[in-house]
């Protein structure tokens, strides 16, 4: 057992009144009623009392695929899952030979603290009244372990997902994501020739640039397999409790091919900020955010406060790295700052019990940091159609190779 369990927070409270089903749930229920080869199930209930919903689409054969949306609740991927379900239902060639298990939302408790859709602006995305990104220890897909027994208390969502993986033993585990900036890229747990050879074609058809380095999206990518394709580092668990990802768990236990598919939220025009200038900006943000954090109630009281505390400690080490570079790694530094300031402002609003002016100071600082970032970066949002095209193209490539990709594009 974890000797330092997380305190109970309002985020984990059981919802008093279940909300109406969203578009994904309605679609899954409609297909369950319409087709005998579609089955909607609630695989279990999260710590917050929310259902973990799965739509199974059976296409025959002995292969299975698990596809996850919503693993990071601040990254809008439900739209992709919606289109994937439509394509599988409408086109037998795409579901042929495979049983698909489509997880509608892999972190319902985290999603409850987000409000989609948001405008395509930086300020809209990081709106402190609508934004939540859990710290790593609150992310169900990073609460897996290869250690038996586990060295920490696993969230219910992780236990449900693990049971799904153990039951289905998927050939492919797909995880849809949206990196904030840079280019599109795909991570695989082992080299996969179709992905290596076709990813550039998928990106070109989708109309999104490929990432050229992991620095762009903030992932520590080192082993480049092909343009836009990286190998996920071997990971048997990090830290004293040996946490790892769902993809590494499935790869280790079931020889599953893990595929993490990242499409960018924004395209940022290249800038030439120096590393030292970026380091100064990070240090200044750290000092101002620390002052605000010291003036508000204990950060452990809310999930937003927990997230602010976890990421505030990242700013100074990142500043040291930037100071040693000739040129900054770019907007990743901005996203790190804004994740802290948004969470801190949300915590201040939700507690509203500090010294006079503390709430206003936290909110004003977040708005200042968001505004200065928006002024400095020249950017445009990636259309949702391009995101869906890259996500689905990369997934179908991993499952069916070139024939499946051609079938997908024939049925646009």
Image (tube, rainbow, N blue to C red):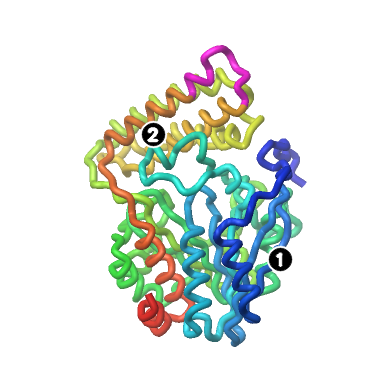
Whole-number angstrom distance, CA of label 2 to CA of label 1: 41 Å
Q: Residue at x 62, y 46 (%)?
A: 138
Which numbered marker is on residue 319? 2
Earlier sequence position, callout 2 versus callout 1: 1
How far across and how far down the image is residue 32, in percent?
64, 73
Q: Depth check: give the residue in front, 408 or 47.
A: 408
| Above or below, comparing residue 192 to residue 11 in the picture | below
Which numbered marker is on residue 222? none
How far across and how far down the image is residue 120, in percent?
37, 46
Q: Quadrant of residue 368?
A: top left
Judged from the image, the secondary structure of the residue bearing numbered disc 2 is helix
Q: Quadrant of the C terminus?
A: bottom left
Q: Which residues are magenta?
A: 351-362
Q: Residues within 10 Å of mark 1 (few under 14, many from 20)?
A: some
| Above or below, comparing residue 407 to residue 135 in the picture | below
Q: Quadrant of residue 227?
A: bottom left
Residue 355 magenta-drawn? yes
Which numbered marker is on residue 163? 1
Q: Residue at x 54, y 44 (%)?
A: 114
Q: Comparing marks 2 and 1, which lies closer to the viewer?
A: 1
Q: Is residue 215 visible?
A: no
Q: Depth check: give the residue in front, 36 or 191.
A: 36
How far across and how far down the image is residue 18, in percent?
69, 49
Judged from the image, the secondary structure of the residue bearing numbered disc 1 is helix
Q: Residue at x 47, y 25 (%)?
A: 363
Q: Is residue 242 visible?
A: yes
Q: How many marks?
A: 2
| Above or below, comparing residue 347 to residue 361 in the picture | below
Q: Depth check: give the residue in front, 263 or 195.
A: 263
| Above or below, comparing residue 13 to residue 279 in the picture | below
Q: Is residue 358 left or right of residue 283?
A: right
């Amino acid at each position: 057992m974890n000797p330092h369990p997380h305190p109970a927070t309002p985020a984990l409270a059981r919802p008093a009144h279940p909300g109406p089903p969203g578009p994904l749930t309605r679609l899954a229920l409609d297909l369950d009623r319409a087709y005998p080869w579609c089955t909607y199930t609630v695989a279990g209930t999260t710590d917050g009392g929310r259902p973990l919903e799965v739509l199974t689409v059976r296409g025959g054969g002995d292969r299975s695929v698990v596809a996850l949306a919503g693993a990071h609740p601040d990254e809008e991927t439900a739209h992709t899952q919606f289109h994937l379900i439509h394509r599988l239902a409408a086109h037998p060639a795409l579901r042929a030979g495979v049983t698909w298990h489509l997880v509608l939302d892999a972190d319902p408790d985290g999603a409850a603290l987000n409000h989609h859709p948001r405008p395509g602006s930086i300020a809209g995305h990081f709106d402190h009244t609508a934004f939540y990104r859990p710290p790593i220890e609150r992310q169900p897909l990073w609460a897996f372990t290869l250690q038996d027994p586990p060295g920490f208390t696993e969230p219910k969502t992780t236990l449900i997902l693990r049971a799904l993986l153990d039951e289905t033993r998927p050939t492919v585990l797909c995880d849809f994501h949206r990196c904030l900036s840079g280019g599109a890229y795909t991570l695989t747990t082992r080299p996969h020739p179709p992905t290596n050879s076709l990813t550039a074609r998928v990106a070109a058809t989708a109309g999104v640039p490929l990432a050229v380095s992991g620095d762009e999206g903030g992932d520590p990518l080192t082993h480049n397999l092909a343009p836009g394709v990286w190998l996920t580092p071997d990971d048997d668990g990090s830290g004293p409790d040996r946490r790892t990802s769902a993809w590494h768990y499935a790869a280790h236990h079931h020889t599953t091919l893990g595929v993490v598919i990242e499409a960018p939220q924004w395209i940022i025009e290249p800038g030439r900020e120096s590393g030292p200038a970026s380091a100064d900006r990070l240090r200044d943000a750290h000092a101002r955010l620390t002052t605000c954090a010291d003036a508000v109630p204990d950060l452990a009281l809310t999930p937003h406060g927990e997230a602010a505390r976890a990421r505030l400690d990242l700013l100074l080490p990142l500043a040291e790295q930037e100071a040693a570079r000739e040129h900054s790694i770019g907007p990743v530094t901005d996203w790190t700052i804004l994740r802290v300031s948004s969470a801190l402002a949300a915590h201040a609003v939700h507690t509203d019990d500090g010294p006079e002016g503390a709430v206003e100071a936290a909110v004003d600082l977040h708005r200042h940091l968001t505004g200065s970032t928006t002024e400095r970066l020249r950017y445009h949002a990636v259309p949702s159609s391009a995101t869906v095209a890259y996500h689905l193209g990369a997934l179908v490539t991993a499952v069916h190779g070139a024939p499946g990709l051609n079938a997908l594009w024939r049925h646009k």
